Image: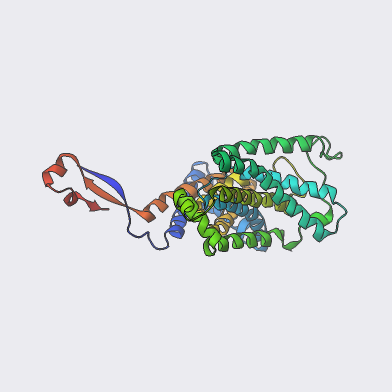
Amino acid sequence: MRRPVLVRRDRPVRGGQPLAFAVGLILALAVGAILLMTAGHEPLRVYQRMFEKSLGDPTAWSLTLNRAVPLGLAGLAVAVAGSMGLWNIGAEGQILAGAMGAAWVARIGGAWPGPMLLTGMLAGAIVGGGLLALVPAVARARVGVNEIITTLMLNEIALRLLQWLIHGPWKDPESFNFPLTPMLPDQGRLPTLFGRAHVGVLIAGAVILVFGVAASRTAWGYELRVAGSSANTARYAGISLKRKILTVLLLSGGVAGLAGGIELAGTADRITEGISNGFGYAGIIVAALALLRPSGVAAVALLFGAVQVGGQSIQIIGVPASVSTILQAFILFGAIGAGVFVRYSVRLVTTGVDASASGDGDDGEATA
């Protein structure tokens, strides 16, 4: 009797991850086309509109780049922690904490000059996100508490704190009972590059580049990989695991908080309950598709930004915006599935009575 088994390849397929990503995208488009036809829509027309509104002209590009900023920084936050084998599931709450930190600086420094105010707001955002990550970092480093649980639980705490602020102390008196904070001062808004794209695109790109170089080309990045792969090896090499855990989770929280500050100063202009818009959770998908590598985060975030912007644009032709969410999910599943075959091959193995009759189990193996 023969059954298929997965066998690790001696060498992964060259260019495997980009190939797996492309397979995931093709699979997502194919499944999406079936769903659209089932619902009575024309897939080509829908996909054409999504492309035109997300990548078709400079204005569309500016919207996509703005959307890619929080996705990329959230993905980077997860990837930074993942480089040491840690999982930061709290990027959503840390984005909210970053937005609150930036808004607090804007409230106390509303009369400051623009460069000073913007610098203070972004610094406040980094501190806000880092502070929210401090509790999980200390709990993991000192007590060994699983960071997945603590970071996830703090998402709800951050949301409740934000709701209290915008319904209470920070509520805009002219909001007509809507839960909103006052608009930022004019000098507290990021300058634009072109179209609607703001300077936050350059800031996010620089942060991703710096972390990419640090993770792959420095002793710090090497120590993170060692600590993540083997705690015993790290101790033997003199690497302090507690210090690395604290550093990595605080940096991860700070990067996610920066996403909240840039989103506030670049796009939102005021805090609302939906300012994070699920970017923190989407960042987990971005990091997973980038294989937890900062170098791949920007490309994945750009694609997801295009899918999200395009998904919003198709509502005007009667297609639910949830189509973009479905496409994102199938891109993830398709890429992960294809990624398995980058590292493994399928081999038919003879087992049971047939194997004993052959006299040699190896004779009954065939690679598919």
Q: Is residue 190 visible?
A: yes
**On the image, which quarter does residue 61 sit in?**
bottom right
Q: Among all residues in the image, which is located at the extreme right?
A: 111
> Residue 302: image x %, image y %?
58, 57
Q: Residue at x 84, y 48 (%)?
A: 108
Comparing 196 with 52, the one in front is 196
Above or below, 57 relative to 279? below
* Left or right of residue 190, residue 303 in this image: left
> Residue 258: image x %, image y %?
68, 52
Comparing 90 with 237, the one in front is 237
User: Total of numbered circles in the picture?
Assistant: 0
* Left or right of residue 299, residue 97 in this image: right
Give the position of the N terminus as an image quadrant: top left
> Residue 110: image x %, image y %?
86, 51
Q: Is residue 46 visible?
A: no
Q: Residue at x 65, y 44 (%)?
A: 134
Colour scheme used in the picture? rainbow
**On the image, which quarter does residue 192 sit in?**
bottom right
> Residue 296: image x %, image y %?
53, 58
**On the image, which quarter does residue 351 sit in?**
top left
* Left or right of residue 72, residue 35 in this image: left
